[in-house]
Amino acid sequence: MAVNRQTALDYAKMGADTLIRKFTAEKLPPEKSFLYHQGVFLSGMERIYLHSGDKKYFNYIKDWVDYNIDENGKLRFIHYDPQFDYMQPAILLFNLYKETGDERYKKTLDAFAPTVEMWPTNARGGFWHKYEHPNQMWLDGLYMIGPYSVMYAHHFNKPYFFETIYQQMHLMRRNMTDPKTGLLHHAWDDSKTEDWADKHTGLSPEFWGRAMGWYAVAIMDILDYLPGRHPRRHEFISAAVDIINALLRFQDGESGLWFQVVDKGGAPGNWLETSCSCLFAYAIAKAIKTGILHPSYFRPLKRAYEGIIQSLAFENDDLIVDHVCIGTCVGDYEFYINRPTVQNDLHGMGAFLLMCTEYHDVCKQQGLE
């Protein structure tokens, strides 16, 4: 299918519709869990709904949330290992509450706030990635908790959360950025005790694509809700520009995509990874749309978008997003390049929907769609 025959929003709808046909809302994997896998996919679907007004997408999101939240606003399926991955889907509740006025959604949002306030930190104030990973910060964490926290601050007058999330971003940027490439390491152990941690810096050895994708997307989404005159706003903008410029130096010249281990494109076994490429493209598109980046950045954005579209496969009406790394922990180069890939998992499809809807906005802004 040629790139120019469908708009970006058309592609987003095809992706969402493919999974709607495959899964009823309550069966969206992993079943019986309120988890970021579903959250990122459904946040992409929410954007399709907000662009198109098609209630099919709104109702699917609502059905999934209502399956997971009881009449008192409590999660039906309890997770016994506390982690921010289980809070990320809360971003879906803000629009549901706005459109329905159902107090259950507000109760759930309120219930998560004390968790953020009481979350354990390392010696410098950085949130542990999980209870089972004390003193560690992973880039993924900024996406899992950052947008929820600033949305809560914005909607319910809790400005304390703006500063809390700034502190997390600042610690990641300051301690996890490589001065040579400008890229950010996947993880940082402030205690320097993990096997993967450098004994001097505490940093993990590699620059994993999707981790930086979560970080870049989180910053751009946080900026949607950070007040225009907030004293920390310019630092979020600076962080966004820095990571995007660093990533663009490693964009593959032939495909327009990025590699699983971003800075080692020519190394044996490395491969082009779709979900990180979609997340990077989303961040670039949003930065152009909001005026953070000059319109000249549309050229590498277009290369990325078209490269991703050209990588798609189709089975009848179904759209297939392939070459997506499964969820992963922290490791060395061999660990990352040997991670299995999957088709149409929620990481990949969610990232694809986000990219397509944001690219659609930029094209409309520039009179291209």
Image (cartoon, rainbow, N blue to C red):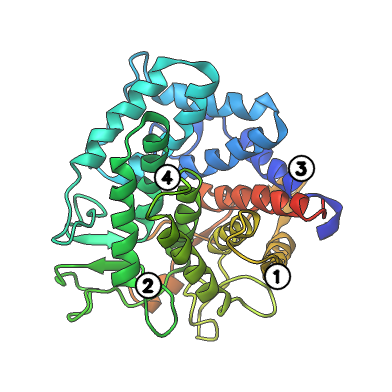
Residue type at tag 2: Phe
Per the image, label 2 sits on a secondary structure element best described as helix
Which residue lies at the image location 34% right of the left edge and 40% below the top edge? 86
Mark 1 or 4 closer to N-term?
4
Q: Tell me if residue 264 comes above or below residue 367 in the rendering.
A: below
Q: CA distance from mark 4 to mark 2?
A: 29 Å
Dots 3 and 2: beta carbons under 8 Å? no
Q: Which mark is residue 335?
A: 2
Sequence order check, earlier mark of 4 and 2? 4
- Residue 322 at x, y = what percent? 61, 58
Which label was assigned to residue 147?
A: 4
Res 198 seen here: yes
Residue 100: percent from left, percent from top = 52, 17
The residue beneath circle 1 is: 296
Q: CA distance from mark 3 to mark 2?
A: 35 Å
Kindly identify the amino acid type of the residue bearing the numbered disc 4.
Pro
- Which of the 4 image quarters holds residue 80? top left
Mark 4 or 2, closer to the camera: 4
Residue situated in front as seen by the camera: 152 or 197: 152
Q: Position of residue 252 (x, y in %)?
A: 62, 78
**Distance CA(mark 1)–CA(mark 4):** 28 Å
Give the labeled residue for mark 3.
Answer: 317
Three-letter code, disc 3: Asp
* 263 w.r.t. 305: above or below: below
Q: Amino acid at mark 1?
A: Ser
Q: Circle 1 — which element?
A: helix
Where 69 sits versus 42, above or below? above
Mark 3 or 2 closer to N-term? 3
